[in-house]
Amino acid sequence: MEEQLSNTKYNKATEGHIGKIKAKIARLSADEEKRRSSKGPTKGFYVKKAGDSTVALVGFPSVGKSTILNQLTGAKSEIGAYHFTTLDVVPGVLEYKHAKIQILDMPGLIKDASRGKGRGREVIAAARSSDVILLVCDVFNPDVSVLLKELWNAAIRLNQKKPDVVITHSDHGGIVIKPTVRLTKITEETAKDMVAAYGHVNATVVIREDIDVEQMLDVLAGNRVYIKAVMAINKVDIAQPGQLERAMSMYPQFRKVPVSAATGYGIEDLKETLYDTIDMIRVYLKPQGQEADMEVPLIVKRGNDIGAVCEQIHRDFRNNFRYAMVWGRSAKFPGQTVGIDHVLEDEDVVTIIVRR
């Protein structure tokens, strides 16, 4: 089927056929992965979660990931001018603007890593659990198309949002496609054929955005992870004229930071970029009847609610939660009484009342 797919030219007439083949390949690949995993667990990298978020360093061997980790965190990851210096995941913690960001230095990825070459499956599994992927390349070889392909094949979608598509199964009625917007990249018939090819018999598919064939395939597979990504271009201190400009012009979908891990150039800009990309907010706690502690904020990701704050303080706070009072941007008025699902904004002040 893969050979048939590669020999089929894409056009409007073949769109539906290609979609069906891709759906069948995805289903068979998923079945193969289940069979492989049922044979027993494979050895992987175990990294204990620490801090408020996690950043994974992904790049080819010997591009300077370990030195960047050392510059960011003060960790002691072994460095050397030869391939595969790092043979395990080395963690470090970057403390920046009161946030604690876990940085993971991982072995370099190579071609066919998504198929297991060079312990690629273990590396990618660690990357899948991160909040941000920092793609590291050097200014002499800024082409990371192989890396991007391996991450794509491993079901990692960089700087993308999960398609707004809902599949609801039923006992009868066949497959019904219900778009709520005009579809310009995929036809309803192609979407229906793909759903059927993936093995669904009776289902209602509500499509709320103008998706394409690949996004429909991602929805059907159900195992995609959507991770923010930025790019660090290393070794700029020894770049030749024009090399940095060329590197910066490539891959416009990524925010890029030129750095020199050897001299420390650009490291502060990289810290700021990672902090902004994770998109964390500061929440200040105010004990009932007392002043708020404005010196040390609680760091949570944007979009988190009062419940997330309760869990970060202690799980008993969520279990015994009564109500909260909020001052700041998310409150309609100072001291508003809110429930556990109230979404917070940056620099909100919160008082949490629990049952005693």
Image (spheres, grey):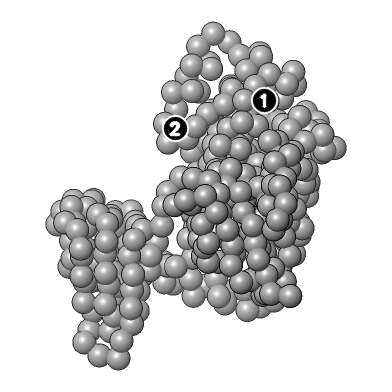
Task: Give the structural element (helix, strand or loop) at label 1.
Answer: helix
Task: Give the numbered dot on residue 343.
Answer: none
- Residue that numbered label 1 is attached to: 268
**Relative to 271, is 160 above or below?**
below
**Relative to 240, is 228 above or below?**
below
Image position, residue 242 (x, y; %): 50, 11
Image position, residue 87 (x, y; %): 78, 47
Lower position in the chain sequence, tag 2 or tag 1: 2
Residue 146 can be seen in this image? no
Side of 58 where 228 appears, left or right: left
Q: Residue at x 20, y 65 (%)?
A: 179
Which quadrant of the figure has residue 296? top right
Q: Residue at x 30, y 91 (%)?
A: 171
Residue 339 can be seen in this image? yes
* Residue that lies at the very extreme toward the bottom in this rendered image: 171
Q: Residues within 10 Å of mark 1 (few under 14, many from 20)?
A: few
**Relative to 198, is 336 above or below?**
above
- Residue that numbered label 2 is attached to: 251
Mark 2 and mark 1: span between their CA atoms? 22 Å
Amino acid carrying label 1: it is Glu
Task: Give the structural element (helix, strand or loop) at label 2.
Answer: loop
Image position, residue 188 (x, y; %): 18, 65
Query: Which residue is at the front of the view, 198 or 127?
Result: 127
